[in-house]
C-alpha cells in the first residue's frame, strides 16, 4: 500500500513538473548595441522588414521534462526577434518605419543545450533590398544551468534575451552591416 502511495506521489510530481512552462522575459536593450547604433550616421534611418525562420520554435523549445520554453505574450520567435531589433533601433534613435534602409532577417538555426556547458546557438541571414545577397551571422551564447529541470529551464528561458542581444550585436558589428 505504501508503495502505491509513493508511486502516486512521484507520478503527480512528474506530471506537475512537465506542465511547467518557463517563459522568456520581455526583451531588454543591450548597452553594447545602443553604443554601436549611436555611432551610425544620425541622418540615416533604418527600418525592420521581414523576420522569418526556417526553424519551428515549438519543435526546438522543449526543455527536459519542464515543458516548452514560452515567449512573452505567446509571441512567435519571429515576432520576438523583430520586436527586439526594433526596440534597439528605436531606443538608439535610428528607427523610422518608412526608412529607405530596411533590414530583413531569416533565422536559419536556433537551438539550446540546457546541461553543462549550457548555451543558445542562433544563426541568421541578414539582407536588405539594397544588399540582397546579405550575410550570415551565428552566435553561441553560454549561460549558467542547474541540475534540476525547473531551474535549468528557467535559466534557459532567461538566457534567450541575452542570446538575441548577442545576435543583434553580431548583425551590427558585421563588416557588411553598412552595406544594408
Image: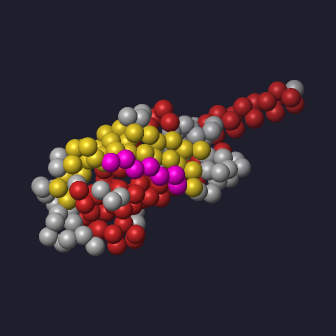
Residue at the far right: name it: 2
Quadrant where the C terminus is found in the figure: bottom left
Horizontal and vertical percent position of residue 131: 21, 48
Task: Give the residue at x 33% y 42%.
Answer: 106
Colour approach in the figure: secondary structure
Horizontal and vertical percent position of residue 8: 75, 30
Task: Give the residue at x 40% y 69%.
Answer: 32
Q: In which quarter of the image is residue 78?
A: top left
Q: Is residue 44 visible?
A: yes
Q: In which quarter of the image is residue 96?
A: bottom left
Quadrant where the N terminus is found in the figure: top right
Task: Give the residue at x 13% y 57%.
Answer: 99
Horizontal and vertical percent position of residue 133: 26, 43
Report how many numbered discs are placed on residues in the image.
Answer: 0
In magenta, the rendered stretch is: 135-141
Closer to the camera in the image, 157 or 51: 51
- Check the image and report above or below for 121 versus 101: above
Magenta includes 64?
no
**Relative horizontal placement of residue 163, taking residue 147 as reference (left or right):** left
- Check the image and report above or below for 124 versus 177: above
Closer to the camera in the image, 67 or 89: 89
**Relative horizontal placement of residue 84, taking residue 156 as reference (left or right):** left
Closer to the camera in the image, 26 or 106: 106
Task: Give the residue at x 44% y 40%.
Answer: 109
Horizontal and vertical percent position of residue 49: 22, 47
- Check the image and report above or below for 93 versus 129: below
Q: Main secondary structure of the magenta part?
A: strand
**Relative horizontal placement of residue 13, taking residue 19 as reference (left or right):** right
Q: Can residue 157 be seen in this view?
A: no
Amino acid at each position: 500500500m505504501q508503495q502505491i502511495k509513493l508511486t502516486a506521489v512521484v507520478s503527480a510530481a512528474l506530471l506537475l513538473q512537465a506542465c511547467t512552462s518557463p517563459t522568456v522575459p520581455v526583451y531588454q536593450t543591450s548597452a553594447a548595441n545602443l553604443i554601436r547604433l549611436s555611432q551610425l550616421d544620425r541622418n540615416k534611418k533604418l527600418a525592420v522588414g521581414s523576420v522569418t525562420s526556417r526553424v519551428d520554435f515549438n519543435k526546438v523549445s522543449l526543455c527536459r521534462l519542464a515543458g516548452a520554453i514560452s515567449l512573452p505574450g505567446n509571441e512567435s520567435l519571429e515576432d520576438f526577434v523583430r520586436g527586439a531589433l526594433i526596440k534597439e533601433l528605436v531606443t538608439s534613435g535610428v528607427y523610422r518605419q518608412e526608412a529607405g534602409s530596411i533590414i530583413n532577417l531569416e533565422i536559419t538555426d536556433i537551438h539550446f543545450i540546457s546541461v553543462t556547458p549550457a548555451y543558445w546557438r542562433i544563426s541568421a541571414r541578414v539582407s536588405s533590398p539594397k544588399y540582397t545577397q546579405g550575410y550570415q551571422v551565428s552566435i553561441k551564447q553560454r549561460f549558467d544551468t542547474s541540475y534540476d529541470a525547473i531551474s535549468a529551464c528557467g535559466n534557459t528561458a532567461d538566457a534567450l534575451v541575452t542570446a538575441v542581444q548577442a545576435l543583434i550585436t553580431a548583425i551590427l558589428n558585421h563588416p557588411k552591416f553598412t552595406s544594408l
